[in-house]
Image (cartoon, rainbow, N blue to C red):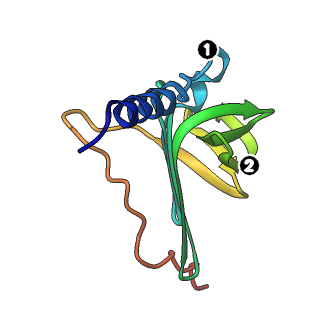
């Protein structure tokens, strides 16, 4: 049977973990969205949740958690000492054709907008990276 002290410690831990998430600052709202490339997906919510998946060869990297802070253009995800940094080489910007792009970890991502009526956006990477076009 849990003691009142254990319950209090658990509640304190849960409150501190939920308090770690920071909403995107006003000057970083361009980062919000669902960003994709053939081998990478990233979801950044205005409320400060970040989900990132990258597939290279047969190795998949997944980083998910609350936004801790921005360091320059880079995104730090996690809480306490458990922090991962996503290197943003080129911050979000609108191209001449109106498409939003940014480059993360050397991969150019395009922000996807949901189609009218879509309730969800798939967050799955293909099981194999796309093969370069053969000439």
Of all residues, the one furthest to the left in this rendering is 117
Judged left or right of residue 58, residue 5 is: left
Q: Mark 2: few, some, or many residues within 10 Å (few <14, many ≥20)?
A: some
Q: Please say if 52 is above or below 118.
A: below
Disc on res. 26: 1
Q: Are marks 1 and 2 in contact (CB under 8 Å)?
A: no
**Closer to the camera, 93 or 75?**
75
Q: Residue at x 37, y 61 (%)?
A: 124
**Closer to the camera, 75 or 32?**
75
Residue 86's spot in the image, x, y percent?
A: 68, 49
Q: Residue at x 33, y 30 (%)?
A: 4
Res 124 visible:
yes
Quadrant holding the N terminus? top left
**Closer to the camera, 7 or 20?**
7
Residue 59's spot in the image, x, y percent?
A: 56, 77
Disc on res. 87: 2
């Amino acid at each position: 049977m849990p003691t009142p002290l254990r319950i209090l410690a658990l509640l304190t831990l849960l409150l501190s973990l939920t308090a770690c998430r920071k909403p995107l600052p006003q000057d970083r709202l361009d980062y919000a969205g669902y960003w994709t490339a053939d081998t990478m997906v990233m979801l950044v919510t205005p409320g400060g949740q970040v989900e990132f998946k990258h597939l290279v060869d047969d190795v998949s990297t997944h980083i998910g958690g609350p936004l801790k802070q921005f360091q320059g253009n880079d995104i730090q995800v996690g809480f306490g000492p458990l922090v991962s940094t996503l290197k943003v080489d080129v911050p979000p910007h609108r191209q001449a054709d109106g498409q939003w792009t940014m480059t993360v970890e050397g991969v150019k991502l395009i922000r996807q907008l949901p189609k009218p009526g879509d309730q969800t956006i798939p967050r799955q990477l293909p099981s194999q990276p796309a093969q370069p076009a053969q000439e």
